[in-house]
Amino acid sequence: MLDIATDPSLTVDERLEKIIEQLRSLPDRGVAKALQFILTTDSAAAATYPANYLALLPDLLKEKCQAVEHIRKKKNLMIAAVNLIKEMPTDVIDRLITDYFENPSAEGMYSIIFEIATHFPSRLHKFAKRIEDKSILQAIRPGGPDTWVDEMVESYLRGADPAILKELSKFHTDKALEALLNLNSRIPDKDHEDFYMYIENSGVFPETRKASVHFKTYRGIVVQRDRSSHHMGGSFPFGVPKCPICEKTANHILTLNATELNFDLESGHNPSFFWFQCPHPAEFLFVHFKDDGIECLMDPMTDGDVGTDLIPGDLALLLVEHPNQFGRGLEAIPGFANHQVGGYPPWVRLERFPRCPLCQKGMRFLASIDSGITPLGYLAFEGILYGFWCDTCAVSATRCQND
């Protein structure tokens, strides 16, 4: 493994891909070898590859905690733990927070505390006055205390700075949403369109006050088809959308099993999302589900062919409870396997939600699929795909953003 991790002829992505191929061919998916390598190497760069591989696998909490605790003691390996942070129990997170404040300039510690702020913002709320970094402070806004909301409202009333409205929209609490709604009459006309976007991303549609998101959030982990009923890639029983210009065929990105989600979905259809990547990108891909099949509402359909260039085979998405139920405080960076079902959309750039072409009402956010490596191959699209669903009309919408 070391020869691959240090091969100067390979890119970082190529090294990770080769190491994953090597490890997953072993009887235990290479878990023991990956862990042993982390426990014996003195190279932070080399340790990062097997640690990132472990982060892509479900379960294995004991092994992942062992790796992180070893890395904590070694200190110089700290950067290797970054992608394992989101799965750590809170006692490990609290020890890492203590490590940070004891030596915030230590190698790799900024990346660690940034990851903690992203996935465990509430663990840092009580330390806010000790944090000087603006990005970390923004990252811990979600779920923040009501006093922070009151302070921001007072600040807005003094100066009408529209940036404060955006910050309020990142709290994702009842208090912050109520504060935004109460400010409606104070918003200048020039800021209203952005203001409605902030309301929508806070959890309700501004025109109806109905929920724009599902308030339970899951992390998604890409696994083999038999591990989950939420299927990715592979065939689809009906034709799929295609590009009207170059006829590029869409891939079947994800079908969620509605009966296994604790969401209020009543249409009787399993929401499915599709995407093709070509030089003629669609803004949204709208698909209408009917008893006898599907129809694409804006683009033509194939007779049955399904694209295979974006999803590497018959896969599935295993759902586990997300450690952060209040969403992201900062914009997402694509390519790090941060898949999500439910919750608030992890936008690369904040946007308004799509409107259903059939009923013209706002469509609730349902899922996001990140690009990049999985234990079973690359998700080969660029950026993050976002899935929205109108349960009344059984219409899905897929949107792509990249950086």
Image (spheres, rainbow, N blue to C red):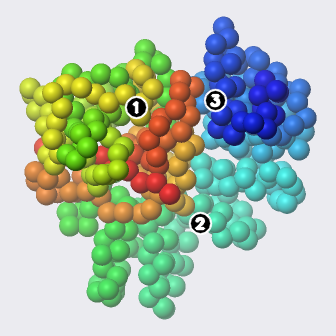
Outermost residue on the bottom side: it is 158
- Pointer 1 residue: 309
Mark 2–mark 1 Cα distance, whole angstroms, equals: 37 Å
Q: How many marks?
A: 3
Crowd class of label 1 (few under 14; some 14 to 19; many from 20; radius 10 Å)? some
**Type of amino acid under label 2:** Gln
On-image quarter of the N terminus: top right
Whether residue 125 sits left or right of residue 231 in the image: it is right
* Residue at x 57% of width, y 43% of height: 336
Mark 3–mark 2 Cα distance, whole angstroms, equals: 33 Å
Q: In this view of the protein, can residue 51 be seen by the observer? A: no
Location of residue 363 in the rendering, given as x and y in whole percent from the top left corner: 24, 52
Under tag 3, what secondary structure?
Answer: helix
**Type of amino acid under label 1:** Asp
Location of residue 62 in the rendering, given as x and y in whole percent from the top left corner: 71, 24
- Pointer 3 residue: 17
Tag 3–tag 1 contact (CB < 8 Å)? no
Crowd class of label 2 (few under 14; some 14 to 19; many from 20; radius 10 Å)? some
- Lower position in the chain sequence, tag 2 or tag 1: 2
Location of residue 374 in the rendering, given as x and y in whole percent from the top left corner: 55, 30
Mark 3–mark 1 Cα distance, whole angstroms, equals: 17 Å
Q: In this view of the protein, can residue 32 be seen by the observer? A: yes
- Lower position in the chain sequence, tag 3 or tag 1: 3
Under tag 1, what secondary structure?
Answer: loop
**Type of amino acid under label 3:** Glu
Whether residue 233 sits left or right of residue 285 in the image: it is right
Location of residue 84 in the rendering, given as x and y in whole percent from the top left corner: 68, 37
Instruction: Establish if 293 lies above or below 102.
Output: above
Question: Any mark on residue 138, and which?
Answer: 2
Instruction: Establish if 366 lies above or below 374.
Output: below
